[in-house]
Amino acid sequence: MRIKAIGQGALQASFVIAVGFVGIFILNLLVWLVEQTHGSSFKTVTQTSARIWLNAQGVPLHFNAGHVAGLAVPEYVFDLIPLGFALLIGWSMYRAGRRLSGESYLGFAWAGAIVLYLAIATTLTSASYAKSIHVLDWQGVFIPTALFSALLIIGSVVGEPLYVENQNPSALRDRVRDYFMALKDKLPWAIKPLIAPALRAGTGVVLAMSAVSAILVSLMLLLNWVEVVRLYQSLQLSFFGTLTVSFGQLALMPNVIALANSWLTGVGFSVGEGSMVSPLGTELGPLPAIPMLAALPVGANSFGIVFILVPLLCAFGATLLIKSHTAELRFAYASATSAAIALGVAIGFVAAIEMWILADFSGGSIGPGRMAVVGANPWLVAGVTFVEVTVASVLAAFFSARPDAADAELIQRTRRIK
């Protein structure tokens, strides 16, 4: 049974690798076979696929100094993570853990999966090396394996186990769950009733802002479709080249939505050092020939300041909608003021942390010189989000967290003691 569990773990790891590396390798292989690009070979296809796979899991790519089209290019680091591709790989890792959650020998299943993933990460790190581009060996091996291990274990212990026929649930799984439940029970009384409603409302604020951002990005692409088409034409791509560029932009679309979230807070973001895209106006320098960048707003926008109300409205609405999840909170806190302030601050904190994560992972370096700065300042985004969300959530919490009535039983006990 232990050998079978190891095999199941290795099988689930192979599915994750198929979703990530094999998919991008097949696309690159088709492009190479059809296009027969000068200087390309099966080796370069493997190297490119390995780099994309590693980069999607947070591994920076190091470009050595060289010449492109006769121009000297200094050494630089590419560490912008394509969040669309990264989310796909991360979801497959989590699903692999869910499929292993019913294994009796869960530890052996984890070992089988992690060892295989470690071996593949080591192999692809070695295969990605070239004179002009490379990754640091420890980063290429450690970062993907650590990410896979974390999401695999989380998927295995969260939620009800997916039982395997004729097998009992894993004692290891129960011990891990009990450990974290014990930590939760040890939290102070003032914090425990805040966790569930704050997580729901704070996450709801970020999701609502992301929905608005997605709509705005779609509208900007629609309004500027002529410029988008012109940029495609200027690249002079073949059919497969156009397909590859389009898939690449789809992989970056969550990055764009996350940057639009930063724009909604009023902080804005940069596309190159010295540039700024914010509701108050846009200042841009030379941009790379990426078609979707044609959707960036240009010049001053007199109505842009109105969009800063979006985080406030999202926070107010999300706080109102969690009233059914604040029963324990309304019982624990003595007054409406203390309950409202505590809940509002907690919601603002959760939203700020999530916005910090989005801002930090959505940007990075994409080239030498000024293009080493792309994205938003995560600390500034988090700070502004905290202030905006907390103010709106505290006001709404006077309704959603207000105690229904005084505790009659406690009042009777107090009178009897007197």
Image (spheres, rainbow, N blue to C red):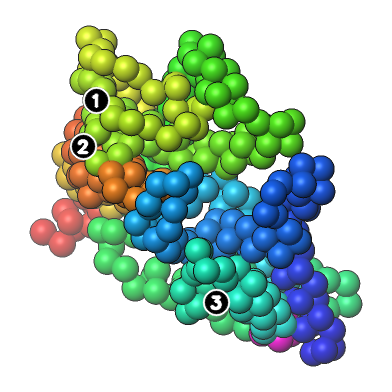
Amino acid type for the residue under numbered disc 3: Val
Answer whether residue 108 is magenta in the image: yes
* Depth order, front residue of 272/3: 272
Q: Is residue 81 left or right of residue 54?
A: left
Which residue lies under the disc numbered 3? 141
Q: Is residue 64 left or right of residue 112?
A: left
* Depth order, front residue of 399/391: 391
- Residue 210 visible somewhere in the drawing: yes
Range of magenta residues: 105-110
How crowded is the residue under tag 1: few (<14 C-alpha within 10 Å), some, or many (20+)? Answer: some
Amino acid type for the residue under numbered disc 1: Glu
Q: Position of residue 109 (x, y in %)?
A: 72, 80
- Residue 106 visible somewhere in the drawing: no
Q: Residue at x 50, y 27 (%)?
A: 292
Residue 396 found in image quarter: top left
Which residue lies under the disc numbered 1? 283
Between discs 3 and 1, the one toward the N terminus: 3
Q: Residue at x 47, y 31 (%)?
A: 289
Count every numbered label the image shows and give the total. 3
Looking at the image, the residue that sits furthest to the right is: 166
Residue 46 found in image quarter: bottom right
Q: Main secondary structure of the magenta part?
A: helix
| Residues at marks 1 and 2 touching, judged by CB atoms closer than 8 Å | yes
Q: CA distance from mark 3 to mark 1?
A: 40 Å
Q: Position of residue 175 (x, y in %)?
A: 56, 82
